[in-house]
Amino acid sequence: MFERKRAARIGGLLSLSLLFFGLQQWLLTGERHGQNEQRVLVADNSGAGSLNLLAQSAPRTAITPTQQYYKAWRIIKEGYYDQKYNGQDWNRWEHHYDGKLKTSDDAHKGIETMLASLSDPYTRFLDRDAFDEEKSQIEAHLFGVGMQLGMNKGHKVVVIAPIEGTPASKANVQPGDEITEVDGKPVTGQSLDVVVKQIRGAINTPVSITFMRKTERRKVELHRAEIPIRAIASTEKLPDNIGYIRLDSFISQKANREMRESLKKLADCDGLIIDLRNNPGGLLANAIDIASMLLLKKSTIVSTIDSDGYKNSTPATGEPLTRQPLVVLINGGSASASEILSGALRDNNRAKLVGQKSFGKGLVQAINRLEDGSGINVTIARYVTPNDTDIHKVGIVPDYKVDLKEADYTSGKGPWWIDVNYSSFKHQPADGKDIQLSKAIEVMKDQIHKTTDTTASATTSTPKN
């Protein structure tokens, strides 16, 4: 019985909404490709050697609104991690809307109401657009013009950065450019989400955007194209031969491959800083794979506990790709998979943590596709770190705490890529203004010094008698 349930629960740790974290919204303007393709998204959380089910095709099936609702009810009944269902008898929902669901919209509203009764923000209904968006992030495919956008204090939509090699970059769109019109229509008074949706569209279709740069007004026609989605935002060498990797998200299937490439580039550094600040998480499989690149074989990475109370521990596999000293940066926006990696590295005495207490999300979700293209994310398990620490709603406290005040952000001393004033877009990791990163560098230098001393002691020859 357990093996059948476990096989059905191969699930993924999804990212929390990006709108939730940080001081700016990092949105890629784009349209998903192949929206009519029917897919079931299943993220593997059983470790290496498991079934490759990430994009298993599912046939198109006609289903009534009542059947749609019942399927959602049954998914919760069989897979939800807390069999107390928030103190209610889950059977009461089975026939709650019998005879009342006439359309798909009726079914969706019924499902949303039913899921809300669990009071679990991570078990939620996804309409078709939200489901496609999640799928696009996992498959690392996005089609648009290639801009990261934000809204400043003056409620103006501005370009945070164009993405290299995209239509926006080729059109010389610059950080700080204000968007005033999309297809000739003013964006004044509209939310960032609305503006992004206006810019989205099918691949190879045009969109006209009017930019303001200081006093210069410029209208540009851009043709939407495939936009590269990268999990690794920065890979570079800092002074004193310290490597720096900023990992933005674990959601893309390519995240582990990108990490391998970054580790290879920085293999000759004396130590590595991995920046997980404002990283909201992603696929559990990616967190496990990346942890295996850094930990000794058979080191425990994470343990999941399902609705039956069964504890399944996942060990690191293979030999580590590097044994360099490690420091990991975290903050309140570091959640889910970020906390799994951070907890695994610290509990195995592999890294020191610097920054602020992490978000505190110790739950695992599975992605479930419904027949009409919508879906539901369902919490199927909770997890604990290698030392059996439950971090849910608690978070991970770093070894070296560096709190940030509002004044630190406004003066540019926060994470180097964040500018709350949207006035300076040229900060770099090595410019010394990011006080949490500066502390991480200080800790890394100390780690390198200790490692050098230990190595020197170990290689000292014993005097002959």
Image (cartoon, rainbow, N blue to C red):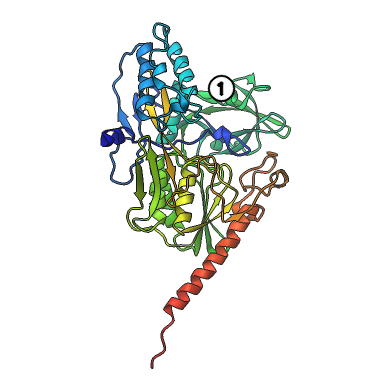
Q: At 65% across and 34% down in the image, what residue appears? A: 177
Does residue 114 appear to the left or right of 406 in the view shown?
left
- The residue lying toward the viewer, choosing from 389 and 101, is 389
Furthest residue to the bottom?
Answer: 465
Residue 402 visible in the displayed image = yes
Q: Image quadrant for the N terminus?
A: top left
Report which quarter residue 371 is drawn in. Answer: top left
Residue 203 visible in the displayed image = no
x then y, percent, for residue 174: 62, 38
Q: Image quadrant for the C terminus?
A: bottom left
Amino acid type of the residue that numbered disc 1 sits on in the rendered structure: Gln
As displayed, is residue 103 above or below residue 288?
Answer: above
Label 1 secondary element: helix
- The residue lying toward the viewer, choosing from 463 and 88, is 88
**Residue behind mark 1:** 198
Graded by Cα atoms within 10 Å as few (under 14), some (14 to 19) or many (20 or more), the crowding at tag 1 reads: some
